[in-house]
Amino acid sequence: MHLVKPEIGYKPYAIEALKAVIICGLSFGLLQLLGIQGRQLAMGLMIVAQTSFAVFFVPPYHFPIRAMAFPFIGLSAIAGGIAGHYIPFAAPALTIIAAAATFYYIFINSIRVICINVVLVFMIFAYFPTPIELAGVYLWQWFLPGILFTVWHWLAYRRHRYTEISLPILESNERDRLLSTVVCLVSLGIAYTVTALLPTRFHSMHVYWIPMVCLLVTQVTVSSTTTYVKQRISMNILGAGIAAILFYVISMPYWLAITLLVALFYLCLFFMFSYKHRTFCVTVMMVGIYHILQHATAVVMMDRVVFTIIAGSIVLVVSFVTYAIVLKFQQPAHSPVSLPASQMRQAQSGK
């Protein structure tokens, strides 16, 4: 896999990734001291890790934006679990509305990324129904890690100011925003429909990967959606193959598997400048996590590949149809749509 070196070099990414790994390690230690184990420990670590991804920018942006990430993502997880338990029929609709609103109304890149992660966490936790009593337990268990996370980022980033990364996103004209919103909204609607119609044998704990992948690959600019879909499918297949060798064929000691997972988490953050490398590392890491939790690794690998292909196909078809409709009804002489040349030719030719 060819790696394109970022303009500012590798060192800033390496330093920021190390900071994120340290705070996740400290949060793990704190949760252990509080006596939290099992699923509740995994949920707490997931919130910390997801927040670390949400606030990872190079160069880093200032503290106030970072400070709002953990409480919003944590509350979103609790709200998703409660919605999945009490109103499971409405959770998909709430997710779609929130995603569409984020895509269309949020212009600031750093805030947009945090909002997308808030929607993503709500979506995932809706598949893990949580009664109100357990939600209250999660709330107090995550309070101290949230304080730790906030204090850590205040110490590390209180001197940082706005940077160019916090400026309005490039795809800010109304037509392009509308295109992205429509592709996201329709893709998520189809994804949720597909998950509901899947045969019973596919209704595993991983079924949320279909709408999750749709959300992740449509958050980019309309001109990058096809490229991201192809990269995600190929890297999921490759990552599943490598994970099969590491965790299914090779029987490695527990301590070595844990060390490998920590290294993979670091690489997931380090490769924030490369979508395909990051996707590869995330795939291997997720399969490894399920291996540590003693779930069926082969099932996880198959689900991840199959569900990613389904989601990618949905986004590609929706994108193509949307582009074709826009090209058919637009005014070519006055208001052209900014699409990639290759997609313009495909839509016009019908191929």
Image (cartoon, grey):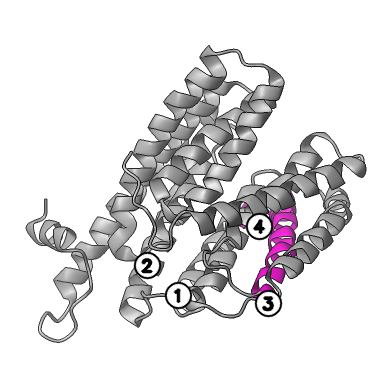
Magenta residues (range): 63-91
Farthest residue, direction left: 349
Which mark, by number, is residue 51? 4
Q: Which residue is mark 3?
A: 159
**Point 53% across, 45% down: residue:** 268
Query: Are the two marked residues, 3 and 4, in contact with CB atoms closer than 8 angstroms?
Result: no
- The kind of residue tagged 4 is Thr
> What residue would you read off at disc 2?
180
> In terms of secondary structure, where does tag 3 sit?
loop
Q: Earlier in the sequence, mark 1 or mark 3?
A: 1
Foreground residue among 175 and 274: 274
**Mark 4: few/some/many CA within 10 Å (<14, 14-19, 20+):** many
Q: Earlier in the sequence, mark 3 or mark 4?
A: 4
- Residue 320: image x %, image y %? 24, 57
247 lies left or right of 126: left
Spatial CA span between label 4 and label 1: 22 Å
Q: Between label 2 and label 3, give the one nearer the viewer.
A: 3
Tag 1 residue: 104
Amino acid, disc 2: Ser
